[in-house]
Amino acid sequence: MPYLSPALNVMTAAARKAGRGLIRDFGEIENLQVSLKGPADFVSTADKRTENQLREELSRARPGYGFLLEEGGVVDGPDKSHRFIIDPIDGTTNFLHGIPHFAISIALEREGQLVSAVVFNPVTDEMYVAEKGQGAFLNDKRLRVSARKKLNESILATGIPWLGRGEHATFLAELAAAMSQSAGVRRFGTASLDLAFVASGRFDAYWERGLSPWDVAAGILIVREAGGVVSDLDGGARALETGHILAANEPLHRQVLKLLTDAARSAKS
Ligand code: IPD
């Protein structure tokens, strides 16, 4: 059984409750796909409503904590040493298109350190949790990153930049290198779940550029507590700050970092 600190208990309860609302909203999406207006406004309302609900639940249980919210930005609380980092719907594009792969992501920071994390996929009812120093769990099962050491046997996951976002040339060079040296590349569209999948050994490694703290904060702790390595794309510890991230087991982290560094350099030369 996972160790659930009182804070983590509050976070999982809030995620479950908000997840029930998201499931109801998701049921509407299919109908809206075929309407002329489309589901965009509906989804943005669902996003904001879910965020408000999470904020209310968490504030009630932990009055005074601050927030970093995808929709609402920075909300300072009188307690300067704690803040929740929340993405109410990570994988909004999937959600909008009726693709059942999205998650609620909640991390708790204490004195600037990630200490508790929840990534909840309400469709599959998969609740990933981690507590600093206590390991990572999927529902009741302890998580471990994969044991694969060979890149040519490994599945890599990534995020593909889209219209108006990211350096396409750099990404294409990285993808070409990853394609030619691995057993396959996946793009599932929800960064928090990509990280949770690395933690559970489903993916061997994951990289992406240009993410926001709420996409990755919870997932970073979950990977680390599952024995994985998370860095920025220079190999440093600033993935949360830079939004450029690589997560993998230790031997693959080294290999994929080199592959990406060489590819990015070749794209610039
Ligand atoms: C997005 C997802 C996606 C990633 C994007 C993020 P959002 O988050 O995590 O996988 O490729 O870069 O912005 O906008 O759905 O919360």
Image (spheres, rainbow, N blue to C red):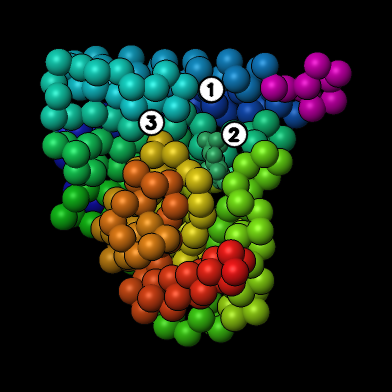
Q: CA distance from mark 2 to mark 1?
A: 8 Å
Task: Give the residue displayed 54% in from the left and 82% down from the top.
Answer: 153
User: Are the two marked residues, 2 and 1, in contact with CB atoms closer than 8 angstroms?
Assistant: yes
Location of mark 1 (residue): 47
Q: Amino acid at mark 1?
A: Asp
Which percent across, then down, holds residue 191? 50, 48
In which quadrant will I find the C terminus? bottom right
Residue 14 appears in the figure = no
Q: Residue at x 66, y 54 (%)?
A: 168
Give residue 264's quadrant in the image.
bottom right
Q: Check disc 2: other Cα within 10 Å, few if <14, some if 14-19, many if 20+.
A: many
Q: Which residues are magenta?
A: 31-40
Say which residue appears at 39% left-offset and 72% top-offset: 253
Residue hosting label 3: 86
Find residue 76 and report its horizontal and vertical position in percent: 24, 18
Relative depth, front residue between 216 and 19? 216
Looking at marks 2 and 1 on the same chain, the residue that comes earlier in the sequence is marked by 1
